Amino acid sequence: MKKRLLALMLAASMVFGLTACGSSSTGSASSEASESATSEDGASTNSTVVIAMGSGFDTLDPGQVYEKYPQMVINACYETLFKFYSNDGAAEPMLADTYSFNEDNTVLTITLKDGVTFASGNPLTSKDVAFSLNRTKNLQGNPAFITDTIASIETPDDKTVVINLTEPDGAILSKLAYSACSILDSEVVTANGGTDAEDAATSDSAQAYLDSASAGSGMFVMTSYIPDSEIVLEKNPSYWGEATNVDKYVIKIQDDANTQMMTLSSGDIDIACNMTEDTMSELEGKDGITLLNNSTKTVSFLMMNMDESIGGPVSDPKVQQAIRLAVDYAGIQTICGEGTTTPYSIIQEGFFGSLGERSTDYTDVEAAKALLAEAGYADGFDIDLTVCDLAMEGIPLTDLAQKVASDLAEIGINVNIVSEAWAAGYGDDYRDGKLGFTVMYWGIDYNDPNVQLEFLAGGVVGLRAGWTAESDPEIASLYAKATNAIEDADREAVLKEIQEATYEYGPFVMLAQAPCPMAYNSRLTGVAFSDPYTVDLTQVNVQ
């Protein structure tokens, strides 16, 4: 790709301004740190780590957080009953010591670990768990759906939590690992306006407090949050577990990849979370910097509305299949950069039960033309493709829209790209199912394949494409079949059935599973990409 020279020059001037304001160039993040730690060989090390991450959020209240980057902060300051210790692994006990399901998988009983204390010094009890989960449910914020299958919670003693489910939920452990299920110090949150009552959506006033301080049992505590600017985390002095040797994180909220690249190069930041293929190439081979280019579980897709009054020609299943065959998947992957794959179907690679990738040679232009002719469009047709101003892991959706338009021209479909701002109406139209033909992306809500069931008929995303359960009952029935499966073998079987059913059918064409280019100072260990947390700060150490 062409290097964005002008952007680099601007970024360089910005960095000069930053470094001229008191930053030494002799040590990584030296402008932020005065603390030091001692490494294994006895040498003094800088124990403050500076991170640059993306924006797009306005709260750090665990019961309200839904966006991508705050998960990094919540994971550092709070703990959950279960956690993902590796990106492709299953949820494992964290605050939970033991757990078991009843015979019909509708009751989950958890025994809490001994010796866990909050940053306040208060001990963790089952009442804190019930308060935290009920608060998230009753706040009715964006992440409240995570608790939809929780009917009620019982606390027979301080160490036992009994979660009664509305139905068997094969993803419940993964959901309990999500940031919205973080366990809060109920005494502290209540004292600062929090409540878990049914009217919490209107009566809870703890967000202001939780945007200025944390109330968890995590390895770090939040000491400062300046919206759209900076977050500071410091080591929890009374942390109950085994801590890393990082004493402080300074998190810069900074979207620009060129600025991140330049400040990482100069040693003013240690981890750059928002890199691009271009900025990664600038850092390749640079001494003291390590590059990461992992696939995420974030996917881009074409959506074709099944309601003919909205989708027009693309509501026809034969047209949908023609479009699926016309897309140049190899070309899409080139645009998205190294590390990009295309999912076999709606369950991304890296999820339990995934069938992996769709072959890039799946494209068949002649077969696509034949299908269009069968559908009555031998001469093609004209159609608007709506696209918004968002980017998927740094990849503008407009770039993908232009590639799709070029590919569809090969089979006679003349695409007119209509650009709309997310905040100026596109977002509402997308959620309300008013778009006929669009390119969009999906970042996972929780790290479990069941999150992808929303792409089925009757699911949240399915309905955005006008794909109702009534219009496709056989496909819709797979939703309940998957959520009710608890044992691994049963889950794997139904997930395979779902992927095969949607491999060549349905209103969605999965275009690309995005990479996440990141880079970090080699003085750090334990830095790895994580879908749930971006980077798990509780696993990072300074060498």
Image (cartoon, helix red, strand yellow):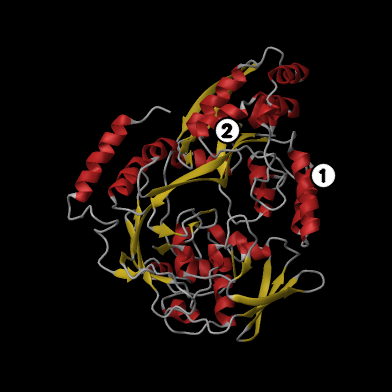
Question: Where is residue 205 drawn, in percent x and y?
Answer: 43, 70
**What residue sits 35% from the left and 60% below the top?**
49
Q: CA distance from mark 1 to mark 2?
A: 25 Å
Extreme-front residue of the structure:
41
Q: Quadrant of the N terminus?
A: top left
Question: Where is residue 83 drawn, in percent x and y?
Answer: 58, 66
Q: Specify few, some or many for label 1: CA neighbours under 10 Å numbering under 14, 14-19, or 20 or more.
A: few
From the viewer's perspective, is 517 left or right of 229? right
Q: Quadrant of residue 259?
A: top left
What amino acid is labelled 1 in the image?
Glu
What amino acid is labelled 2 in the image?
Thr
Camera-nearest residue between 245 and 238: 245
Helix, strand or loop at disc 2?
strand
Camera-nearest residue between 523 and 215: 523
From the viewer's perspective, is 81 left or right of 26? right
**What residue sits 72% from the left and 13% below the top?**
378
Helix, strand or loop at disc 1?
helix
Q: Residue 116, can we see it?
A: yes
Question: Where is residue 336 drawn, in percent x and y?
Answer: 51, 34
Contact, CB < 8 Å: mark 1 with mark 2? no
Q: Specify few, some or many for label 2: CA neighbours under 10 Å numbering under 14, 14-19, or 20 or more.
A: many
Q: Quadrant of residue 215?
A: bottom left
Q: Is residue 32 above or below residue 196?
A: above
**What residue sits 31% from the left and 64% below the top?**
46
Q: Is residue 74 above or below residue 373?
A: below
**What residue sits 29% from the left and 56% below the top?**
28
Residue wearing tag 2: 438
Residue wearing tag 1: 474
| Earlier residue among tags 1 and 2 | 2
From the viewer's perspective, is 393 left or right of 224? right
